[in-house]
Image: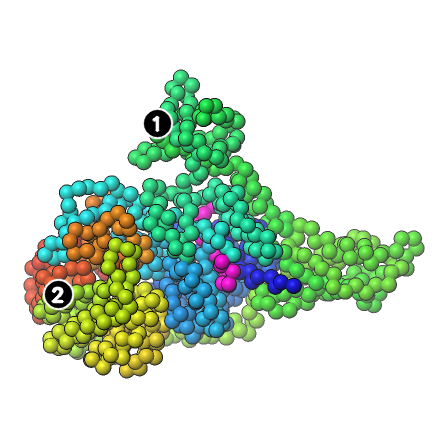
Amino acid sequence: MEKSPHIPELLAPAGSREAFEAAIAAGADAVYLSGSRFGARAYAANFDDDALAQAIQDAHARGVSVYVTVNTLVSDDELPAVAEYLLFLYRIGADAILIQDHGVLSLARQIVPKLTLHASTQMTIHSIEGLRYAAAHGISRVVLARELSIDEVRSLQHEAEELGIGLELFAHGALCMGYSGQCLLSSVIGGRSGNRGTCAQPCRRKYMPVIGRSDRYGRVIPDEEERDPGYLLSPQDLATYPRMPEMMDVAALKIEGRMKSPEYVAIVTSIYRKALDQIQAGTFSPDPAELLAAQFAFNRGFTQGHLFGAIGSAFVSEDRPDNRGVVFGRVQWYDRERGEAVVGDLTAPYPERGDGIVFSKDGEEDIGCEIWTNLRIESGRMRVKVPVPVKSGMEVAINRRAGVQQEAAAIIAGFERGGGRKVRISLFIGMDAGHLFVAGHLRGMKGEDLFVTAQSASPMAEARTRPLTAETISDLLTRTGETHFEAVIEELHYDGGLFLPIQEVTALRRELLSKAEKALIRSAEPVSGEVAEARERLGLFRQETRTPALRRSAPPIIAVYADSVDQVRGALAGGCRRVCYEPAAALSSCGRRQKLEVSEWEDAVRNELIAVMELCHQHKASCFWKFPEITRHRFLDAALPLLDDLYAAGIDGVMVGGVGISETVRARVPEMAVAGSSALNITNRSAMEALKPSYTSVALSREISLAELRSLCIGDDELVEFFVQGSVPAMITEHCIAYGRFPCPSHTGSHLAAIMDQTGRSFPLRVDGECRTIIGNAVETCLIDHLDLILDAGVAILGIELRSRTEEYAAVICQAYTSALSGGTIDQLKDDIRSISWGGITTGPFPGGGFR
């Protein structure tokens, strides 16, 4: 007999109580949701503490798991509240929490070590090294970065099985343009941080490509041709439904949508539930009608994403950033006498009575209306009554399908009528001291065996006329009807000839199922002694004190991020004493850039780094090889073999951002110094303490303020970097904006240098060695007039961004900071910086409230 395939858990979003009920009724195995604090969807309805506790009980009574998101970065002053919240979630039986912050991870292990932890996609885990880090720190499941290919996922799955952790993949819903956890675009534009759950979605806005050449400071001189703006950063929605059989090895498939309606959750969850059930039964064949229903629920166009190799126009939706419905035609003309739009270019499906439709055209307001009559097609055209005149050329789409809405309503109503997955309970029936007795066996929320028992209120008596048969007992006890149980008779020991009123048998069934519900709820809750012990640990944590930082006696180090030898020369001439160098040699390419073979790349990188290192050492400066923030296997496979030669040649260290990479570097060269980059997202003391053993120095998050910096209480033995100058790298994306249309940002001549928003701000572009696009802030951070405050907080290293700039820019900037540290005139130095900056200067979050 052929073995049934492994079927992943189906995980659905619940941004509100209504969506929670929709997800469960539609067949989700688990839901993920957020309390009113520390979740990455701050603008969803979410759940207060009482509602959260009730939701967890209601889910557990139905055998459904609940994962609570605590997946934002937190500041030091929030850590006590986070610790209390973690204990609360443990006490009410949350099945797992999703986390991003390394400080929260450390805190959870310290205070509630038995609380199950999942790494959010915000932790940006995308490599085997990241999985090893997760497993070593008590994480039981990793939500992988959405940029990985299916082949990479399969490779990681083998490692995950060895490590004993599960992998979770997004299967459907909205996509981010940038790597989650590494995107600061919303933060730098308007102070609303995606790392705090308040992303303003600037990727859904229009941008115009800016093509030109660089001036002497690396700023763009645009060519004279203006290009049409478009939604250059707006991905289509992920829809992997047709490819689901290829995704069965992972632990869970996730539907995105905590900001979506309950109807959306009901329809999409039910589609994926049916598909998984069909795959298990061996009957799955992608049904276009199911994908169409998902489109009616919500879509920005559908893509199979990076997971299945979508690039260019197969990934982004440049003409529209919001729900596009299902297009069925285009306005030919407007009949003023009859108040009707004449629609041609018709394609099925067509609107039906009760549907909502929308007329849209770029630059025009959308016009919506409802269909209240049966529409007819005559001569290839359809006439539609509209409330206001519409223009020729407008696209017409169905944006609400009445039939789909009715189906969603029926699914949601099923929550109170036993809709959704059924909990199997095995029944063992017999007699006990004359009473009808039943024992039920089921699996608890942690997979353990649960047993519940019940017996009839009255003893069974000798039957005078119609004895109760075994068949009747079996039938009555398995009539679970509109409950969430499926009862199966395993054993029935009854000789017959006795009588018991039917209502007593049904009461027996109700009592047993009620006890089963309570047993399921209790199975997820910790024992009282464990809660008391956790509260004691919380009390000890609250008593911890820290010593405020003092200015270091050693002079501060000016450190630069560079990707050309010219930049290094300029920086060293200006007084820089640490270079984090990221070679620009191309290991990967989208086709518009010269890619090197691995051996050629290794030679080029080795020679370039040794040349930079020798230049640095001539100026008594240190040289670190700056790894990309995203280090997938193709980079590591090529880079790690170079470490022995580079260490022997005298390189001072490596700077890495992905978790687990430092351990891999040291496994190769144990003596190698490893610096942690700002990609680690350190915003609190707990995170710094947790990560400190892996790094000789760490760069702090580029979103924190002076108050948050001071609260870190940096010790004299800790080398900490703070970013003071340059365009903050605000997004890292695998999508090539130039793909097939514009000259590559890596070109030295005319190239795609920036994208401009509708306020006229230009965001600089560069590409790394693996052809990822990095989008910088439209204005430069400049903290030259705040250096005393920064140094008084214990900072040892001042970080400056030079990548994609010139030797002259590097020299002026580094000389300005060297002069400022030596007592130079700050106002004049600041004016000098402003005069050569890209887009002006800003203090960013530093003087204000930080990344809130």
Q: Name the residue under label 2.
A: 566
| Label located before the other in sequence (1 or 2) | 1
Please identify the quadrant where the C terminus is shown: bottom left
Helix, strand or loop at label 1? It is loop
In the rendered image, the residue lying farthest to the right is 464
Q: Is residue 684 left or right of residue 797?
A: right
Magenta highlight range = 246-263
Q: Residue at x 42, y 62 (%)?
A: 151
User: 527 or 225: which is nearer to us?
Assistant: 225
Q: Is mark 2 on a helix, strand or loop?
A: helix
Q: Do the residues labelled 1 and 2 touch (CB within 8 Å)?
A: no
Which amino acid is tagged 2?
A: Asp
Query: Which of the image's four quarters has the N terminus?
Result: bottom right
Residue 392 in view = yes
Amino acid type of disc 1?
A: Ser
Left/right placement of residue 398 relative to residue 723 reads right
Determine the residue positioned at 71% across, 59% down: 488
**Residue designated by label 1:** 392
Residue 287 vs residue 233, the one in the foreground? 287
